[in-house]
Amino acid sequence: MDVLNSDFDHNSVDFVELFNKLSEIECPYVRAIEIIGNKNTLLILKEFYLHAKPYRFNEILRALAPMSSKTLSEKLTMLERYRIISRDVISTKPVIIRYSLTERGLDLKDLLDNLANWSNKWFSKESSVEISEV
C-alpha cells in the first residue's frame, strides 16, 4: 500500500493502525519518507537536534518562525503518534507541556546528518560542482 499519494491522515488513526498501514509499504525508503519527508517535520527535528533539550510549544514556534501554530501543532501531533517525540504534561498551574525526542527520534539524527552532508556536498552554493545544461 502506498499512502504517499492517498488522503491518509496520520493523526486520525491509533498507533497500531498507523504502524500496520506503514508496514504495508514494501520499500523502506518510501516508508521513511512517508514519516519524515515533509519540510516542516525536518525543521522541527533539526531544532531538537541543535539544542538537545525539551521544548515548550511556544519555544519551538518562535524558533521556527514563520511556521504557523496550526502547522506546528499538526506536525508535533504526527511526530508524537509515530513516537518520534514525546509529549510530557507537568501538572502545575498553569500546566506545562514539554516535547522531547524519544529513542526513536534520537535514532534519526545520524540519518538526517548524512542527508544534510549529501545536500551540502552536491547542492550548496559552496560546493564546487558545476551545473551544466542537460
Image (cartoon, helix red, strand yellow):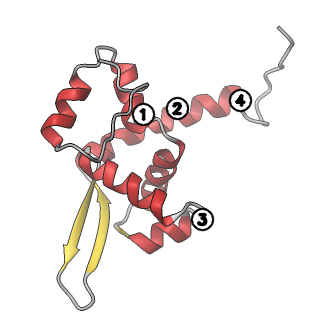
Which residue has dot 2 on it?
115
How much space separates mark 1 and mark 3, taking CA atoms?
A: 25 Å
Which amino acid type corresponds to the residue marked 4 in the rendered image? Phe
Residue at the (66%, 34%) spot, across then down: 120
Which residue has dot 4 on it?
123
Which amino acid type corresponds to the residue marked 2 in the rendered image? Leu
Asked whether the beta carbons under mark 2 and mark 1 sit within 8 Å of each other, the answer is yes
* Residue 124 position by quadrant: top right
Counting the numbered discs, the total is 4
Which residue has dot 3 on it?
65
Asked whether the beta carbons under mark 3 and mark 4 sit within 8 Å of each other, the answer is no
How much space separates mark 2 and mark 3, taking CA atoms?
A: 23 Å
Which of disc 4 and disc 3 is earlier in sequence?
3
Residue at the (46%, 35%) spot, across then down: 37
Question: Residue farthest to the right?
Answer: 133
Which residue has dot 1 on it?
111
Q: Secondary structure at mark 2?
A: helix
Q: 44 or 13: nearer the eye? A: 13
Which of disc 4 and disc 1 is earlier in sequence?
1
Which amino acid type corresponds to the residue marked 3 in the rendered image? Ala
Which amino acid type corresponds to the residue marked 1 in the rendered image? Leu
Relative to 134, does residue 19 appear above or below in the rendering? below
Q: Secondary structure at mark 4?
A: helix
